[in-house]
Image (cartoon, helix red, strand yellow):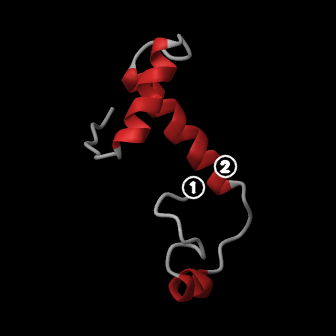
Amino acid sequence: MPKVNINVPEHLEMQIAQLVDQGEFVNREEAIEELLSTGLRAFKTSGPIDEDRLEDDGMMGHDDEYVF
Protein backbone atom coordinates (compact mmCIF):
# COMPACT_ATOMS: atom_id res chain seq x y z
CA MET A 1 0.00 0.00 0.00
CA PRO A 2 1.42 3.44 -0.89
CA LYS A 3 2.35 5.74 1.98
CA VAL A 4 1.23 9.38 2.04
CA ASN A 5 2.43 12.14 4.33
CA ILE A 6 -0.10 14.83 5.21
CA ASN A 7 -0.25 17.82 7.50
CA VAL A 8 -3.51 18.33 9.37
CA PRO A 9 -4.56 21.09 11.74
CA GLU A 10 -4.11 20.31 15.42
CA HIS A 11 -7.88 20.17 16.04
CA LEU A 12 -8.24 17.34 13.49
CA GLU A 13 -5.31 15.45 14.98
CA MET A 14 -6.92 15.78 18.42
CA GLN A 15 -10.24 14.46 17.09
CA ILE A 16 -8.51 11.48 15.46
CA ALA A 17 -6.58 10.74 18.67
CA GLN A 18 -9.81 10.93 20.65
CA LEU A 19 -11.52 8.42 18.33
CA VAL A 20 -8.57 6.03 18.77
CA ASP A 21 -8.59 6.52 22.56
CA GLN A 22 -12.34 5.78 22.62
CA GLY A 23 -11.72 2.50 20.77
CA GLU A 24 -13.47 3.53 17.55
CA PHE A 25 -10.27 2.60 15.69
CA VAL A 26 -7.30 0.40 16.56
CA ASN A 27 -4.74 3.08 15.72
CA ARG A 28 -4.23 6.43 13.93
CA GLU A 29 -3.40 4.75 10.61
CA GLU A 30 -6.67 2.80 10.61
CA ALA A 31 -8.62 5.90 11.64
CA ILE A 32 -7.17 8.09 8.91
CA GLU A 33 -7.62 5.40 6.24
CA GLU A 34 -11.26 4.79 7.20
CA LEU A 35 -12.13 8.48 7.56
CA LEU A 36 -10.51 9.29 4.22
CA SER A 37 -12.32 6.40 2.51
CA THR A 38 -15.63 7.52 3.99
CA GLY A 39 -15.05 11.08 2.82
CA LEU A 40 -14.16 9.94 -0.70
CA ARG A 41 -17.27 7.74 -0.91
CA ALA A 42 -19.44 10.66 0.24
CA PHE A 43 -17.82 12.96 -2.29
CA LYS A 44 -18.22 10.42 -5.12
CA THR A 45 -21.90 9.86 -4.37
CA SER A 46 -22.78 13.54 -4.01
CA GLY A 47 -23.72 13.82 -7.67
CA PRO A 48 -22.13 14.92 -10.92
CA ILE A 49 -19.43 17.52 -10.83
CA ASP A 50 -19.76 20.63 -12.99
CA GLU A 51 -16.14 21.34 -13.98
CA ASP A 52 -16.90 24.97 -14.97
CA ARG A 53 -18.48 25.66 -11.57
CA LEU A 54 -15.43 24.32 -9.74
CA GLU A 55 -13.12 26.70 -11.57
CA ASP A 56 -15.40 29.70 -11.01
CA ASP A 57 -16.25 29.02 -7.37
CA GLY A 58 -12.79 28.02 -6.19
CA MET A 59 -13.12 25.51 -3.38
CA MET A 60 -16.30 23.94 -4.67
CA GLY A 61 -18.34 26.99 -3.71
CA HIS A 62 -17.46 26.73 -0.02
CA ASP A 63 -15.55 29.22 2.08
CA ASP A 64 -14.20 26.45 4.34
CA GLU A 65 -10.70 25.19 3.72
CA TYR A 66 -11.69 21.56 4.32
CA VAL A 67 -14.46 20.27 2.09
CA PHE A 68 -15.36 16.66 1.34
Looking at the rendered structure, the kind of residue marked 2 is Ala
Q: Residue at x 51, y 21 (%)?
A: 19
Q: Which residue is mark 2?
A: 42
Query: Which quadrant holds residue 53?
Result: bottom right
Mark in the foreground, 1 or 2: 1
Residue 54 position (above or below residue 66) = below
Screen quadrant of the C terminus = bottom right
x and y, in percent, of residue 6 in the image: 29, 45
Residue 9 position (above or below residue 53) = above
Q: Residue at x 63, y 55 (%)?
A: 43
Q: Residue at x 28, y 42 (%)?
A: 4
Q: Nearer the viewer, residue 47 or 6?
A: 6
Q: Label 1: how many residues lie within 10 Å, few (<14), some (14-19) or many (20+)? A: few
Classify mark 2: helix, strand or loop.
helix
x and y, in percent, of residue 15 in the image: 47, 31
| Residue 50: numbered disc | none
| Residue 68: numbered disc | 1
Query: Which quadrant holds residue 24?
Result: top right
Screen quadrant of the N terminus = top left
Looking at the rendered structure, the kind of residue marked 1 is Phe
